[in-house]
Image (spheres, rainbow, N blue to C red):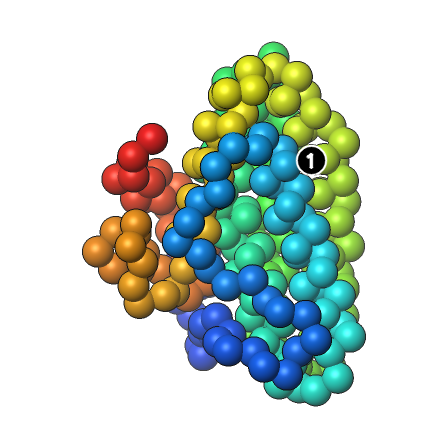
Amino acid sequence: MLLSRATSIRNLKTLPFPIKSLTTTPRFFSSTIPAMGRVSDAVKHDHRELEEQYNNILSATTEDEKTRWQNQFTWELARHSVGEELVVYPAMEKHLSNGKALADKDRKEHAVVKEQLYKFQNLKATDPEFEPTIRALWKDLRQHIKEEEEEDLIALENALKESDSEDLSTSFKRTKMFAPTRSHPNAPDKPPFENVAGLLAAPLDHLKDLFSRFPK
Ligand SMILES: [Fe+2]
Ligand SMILES: [Fe+2]
């Protein structure tokens, strides 16, 4: 269902490149994966960035700025979701007695947010639906983030050795490689996905295969 929905989306957007007029500098995709740090720190770091980008979408004063933050937020959320589904949720299933139930709940919440993201990514900043859509998305996402941070991640960290958590963190950060950039020293021969819809519509097995090409 996601695939047909995704392929029907027109005017798919790519990332914003140089953003000069913004007061906050957006984070661009990096080829380096910072070592160490626990997986919960990496996930929470993304959450804070998403929150900042959401606020920037609302506070931007021009259509151009709003659109750039919209694109940045869309990519960050898509990659964050894929990273959790590839790395974090399987770890919960593996290490927690109630992990399967927790992961299933989280995947369902992701599905709801992704539907909203599909809609949001193609809205023009001048569209009357633009702000209500991102506000509704954020309302759901904020609740999901709260549950992840206050329940899931705490339980997961309690079940993990520090070194295992650090390994998961490294794997999670590799999801940053789902970028529409033309060259990447550590990435496969060509960028896996040129647009968010393609990334979100890809079967999880295919995404796993892509990551299997990286060293542990
Ligand atoms: Fe999540
Ligand atoms: Fe998350």
Q: Amino acid at mark 1?
A: Glu
Dividing the picture into quadrants, the one containing residue 92 is top right
- Residue 111 lies, with reference to residue 182, above or below; the image says above
Identify residue for label 1: 148
Residue, x 52% and y 33% (percent of image)?
A: 36
Residue lying furthest left in this view? 189
The answer, for residue 131, to whether it is visible in the render is no
In the displayed structure image, the side of residue 187 where residue 158 appears, left or right: right
- Residue 171 lies, with reference to residue 5, above or below; the image says above
Residue 34 locus on image (x, y percent): 49, 43
Task: Report the front residue among 35 and 4.
Answer: 35
Residue, x 77% and y 54% (percent of image)?
A: 139
* Secondary element type, mark 1: helix
- Residue 18 lies, with reference to residue 98, above or below; the image says below
Residue, x 63% and y 37% (percent of image)?
A: 41
Q: Is mark 1 within 8 Å of ligand 2?
A: yes
In the displayed structure image, the side of residue 14 where residue 53 appears, left or right: right
